[in-house]
Amino acid sequence: MFDLVIVGGGRMGEALLGGLLDAGWSGRGPAGIAVVEKVAGRRDELAARFDGVRVTDTIPQAAGAVVAVKPGDVAAACASLRAVGVHRVLSIAAGVTIASLQHALGEGIAVVRAMPNTPALI
């Protein structure tokens, strides 16, 4: 089981991953974090840049998750997170309310919403 899975390997997901690794967030280092990305070429880029981080197209078991996908993909991502038993979720998906996240995830999963912006990439 991973400490954290980042669902969405776009610019914001990549920026969060880099920051977490630089800060030593997971006591297990890169092996404690996974990234889910549906685009094969992007998966290859992330795997090359972040050695030791599992980059995959399916959601693995993890204690927590960051949802960093486009709003239209949030419901499917949340359903997959619920299916693997994630306990807490941070969403950075634009325009997606906490109520809709809670509905998609179901009971018993802690939900937080944050709205980073482009300067957070730096």
Image (tube, rainbow, N blue to C red):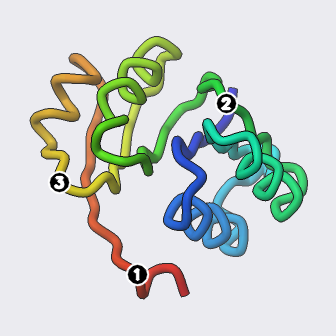
Give the residue number, with chain letter if any, for mark 2: 57
Which residue is located at x 66 percent, y 73 percent? 23
Q: Give the spatial CA distance, label 1 vs label 3.
A: 16 Å
Mark seen at residue 51: none
Check whether the beta carbons of the residues at disc 1 and disc 3 lie within 8 A of each other: no
> In the image, is residue 51 above or below residue 3?
below
Asked if 99 appears above or below 45 in the picture, the reply is above
How crowded is the residue under tag 3: few (<14 C-alpha within 10 Å), some, or many (20+)? few
Give the residue type at disc 3. Gly
Residue 36 falls in which quadrant of the image? top right
Residue 95's label in the rendered image is 3
Residue indicated by mark 1: 118
Q: Residue at x 37, y 40 (%)?
A: 89
Residue 9 x/y as whole percent = 60, 52
The residues tagged by marks 3 and 2 sit, at their Cα atoms, a distance apart of 24 Å
Identify which residue, 60 or 27, lies in the foreground: 60
Quadrant for the C terminus, please: bottom right
In-image side of 4 versus 89 (left or right): right
**60 sits to left or right of 27:** left
Going by the numbered disc 1, the residue's amino acid type is Thr
Q: CA distance from mark 1 to mark 2?
A: 25 Å
Residue 92 at least partly seen: yes
- Residue at the spot x=10%, y=36% of the render? 99
Q: Amino acid at mark 2?
A: Asp
Q: Position of residue 20 (x, y in %)?
A: 62, 65
Percent x, y of residue 65: 48, 40
Q: What is the secondary structure assignment of the residue under circle 3?
A: loop
